């Protein structure tokens, strides 16, 4: 397996994570390092993707970090698992739509392990449960190397979403494992690692 998987137990700042990802993209492009999956949590952070608009900020006191991933404004906070990756599509199928489908399938498979029936939505990118969004996806591709990733709401404080219009949606349309009544979530990192590595290796 040519994918390195890193699991961080301590919270990682968004800027530090982005610095690490950008460097890994360059190293993968030069053949210096393996492809990468990184499972972590961030402290409370609001980020705006390339389609982000200022009017999506409801609470003007918050600080929004602008980033080069796809998508709009979103939230990262403790209790949310973030899965970053650096995957070289030069060595695989150069098909971004297929790549996104693989990410969607991986999240849906993961949720199924916890008896959550989820689905993807072509119009509103992300993974949904009972018409509420539980996972956001934001990807950038440079030189056919795909990076950034996805987030899955486990036990994070959903009230923080009230300060923004997340992904262009009403904040009432966001859910989590905890919100769905699943309070005990075991082996989440282990299952993320197993499912994502398996599916990304199939491309």
Image: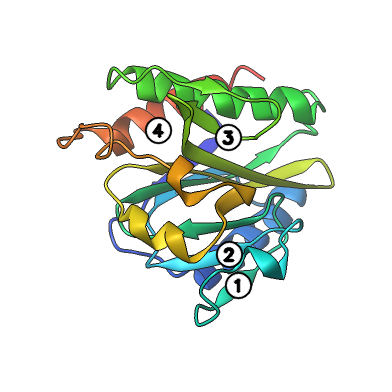
- Indicate the position of residue 73 as horizontal and vertical percent values: 61, 59
Q: In this picture, is 70 found above or below 92?
A: below
Residue identifier under label 3: 126
Along the line of sight, the residue nearer the viewer: 164 or 98: 164
Cα distance in 3D space between marks 4 and 1: 27 Å
Residue identifier under label 1: 65
Q: Nearer the viewer, mark 4 or mark 3?
A: 3
The structure's colour scheme is rainbow
- Indicate the position of residue 34 as horizontal and vertical percent values: 59, 43
Whether residue 172 is visible to the viewer of this picture, yes or no, is: yes
Q: Label 4's element?
A: helix
For the point 81% across and 40% down, the residue is 144
Rendered image: mark on residue 175: none
Residue identifier under label 4: 193
Contact? badges 2 and 3 (CB < 8 Å): no
N-terminal of the pair, mark 1 or mark 2, is 2
Contact? badges 1 and 2 (CB < 8 Å): yes
Residue identifier under label 2: 47
- Indicate the position of residue 202 as horizontal and vertical percent values: 61, 17
- Indicate the position of residue 80 as horizontal and vertical percent values: 36, 50
């Amino acid at each position: 397996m040519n994918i390195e998987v890193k699991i961080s137990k301590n919270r990682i700042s968004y800027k530090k994570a982005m610095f690490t990802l950008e460097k890994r993209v360059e190293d993968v492009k030069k053949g210096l390092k393996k492809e990468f999956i990184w499972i972590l949590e961030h402290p409370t952070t609001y980020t705006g993707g390339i389609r982000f608009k200022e009017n999506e900020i409801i609470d003007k006191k918050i600080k929004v970090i602008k980033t080069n991933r796809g998508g709009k404004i979103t939230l990262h906070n403790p209790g949310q698992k973030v899965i970053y990756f650096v995957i070289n599509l030069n060595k695989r199928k150069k098909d971004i739509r297929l790549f996104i489908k693989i990410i969607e399938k991986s999240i849906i498979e993961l949720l199924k392990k916890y008896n959550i029936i989820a689905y993807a939505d072509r119009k509103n990118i992300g993974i949904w449960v009972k018409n509420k969004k539980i996972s956001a996806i934001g990807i950038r591709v440079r030189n056919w190397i795909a990076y950034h990733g996805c987030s899955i709401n486990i036990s994070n404080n959903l009230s923080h979403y009230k300060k923004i219009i997340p992904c262009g949606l009403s904040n009432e349309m966001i859910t989590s494992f905890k919100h769905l009544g699943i309070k005990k979530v075991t082996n989440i990192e282990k299952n993320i690692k197993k499912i994502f590595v398996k599916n990304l290796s199939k491309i």
